[in-house]
Image (spheres, rainbow, N blue to C red):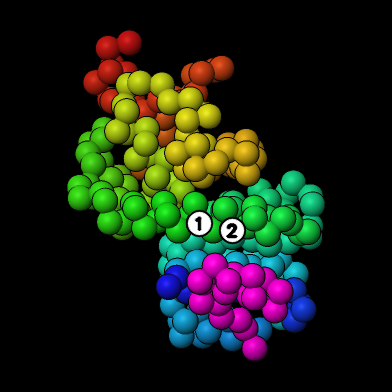
Amino acid sequence: MFKLLLIEDDATLFNEIRNRLTQWSYDVYGISDFAKVMERFSEVKPDLVLIDIGLPMFDGFHWCRMIRSHSNVPIIFLSSRDHPTDMVMSIQLGADDFVQKPFHFDVLIAKIQAILRRVHDYSTTEPVTLRTWCGAAVDLDKNTVSNAEGSVQLTRNEIYILKLLIDRRNRIVSREELIKSLWDDERFVSDNTLTVNLNRLRKKLEDIGLDRFIETKVGQGYMAADESDLHDR
């Protein structure tokens, strides 16, 4: 049974979501003291976290930062806010998805199932956890990319995107294919979410001189190139 930590201060909504998730055999935990979210996180050790943005003490963005500084556990934001910057901020902080309230419960379940299935399959069916690319070591287990210039830590989405591109290096991977591979069902995903993840991935790779090896093919998609191939062009 997967354990979910629901960080929601609306008691009525919390109970409704918990009851529905329990029917799907998820073990749902809540927060009683919103000053001690990280203590509760460490105690529960959840497989996935659901966070509201508007919370007592500190907002959901704060707790997302705190969780990300300790763990790569999947995070989904649940919020009634509808401004695009809220979704962009969520993704930039390392969240895996953003669900706007009010939402259809089937959509939330589909997103939770897709993320947990991806995480489970990724950790159990991928025997080779290291890749070499452009002189760098890509560790799929630790979510890091390292070369002579240093090392960068990626989120789960970022490392998954990079893996997909590296495994098909020198071939174009369409945006639609990336979205479908990453989130399973593109109907529930904003195209902007992929853009944010790719921009953030490139920014991190820039720190170790690898950003130029992720090429944008206008109107087609993206491609991970090898250093030798770029030199030949």
* 181 lies left or right of 125: right
Give residue 223's mark.
Answer: none
* 157 lies left or right of 148: right
In the image, 51 versus 89, the foreground residue is: 51
Residue 206 percent coordinates (x, y): 43, 39
Mark 2 belongs to which amino acid? Ile
Residue 145 percent coordinates (x, y): 32, 47
Give residue 109's mark.
Answer: 2
Residue at 40%, 45% in the rendered image? 160
Mark 1 belongs to which amino acid? Gln
From where the camera sits, is residue 186 visible? yes
Q: Quadrant of residue 219?
A: top right
Secondary structure found at label 2: helix
Residue 46 percent coordinates (x, y): 47, 74
* Figure check: 74 above or below 196: below
115 inside magenta stretch: no
Looking at the figure, which quarter contains the C terminus?
A: top left
Q: Which residue is mark 1?
A: 113
| Label 1: how many Cα within 10 Å (few below 14, some 14–19, many 20+) | some
Q: Mark 1 and mark 2 in contact (Cβ < 8 Å)?
A: yes
Magenta region, residue range: 14-32
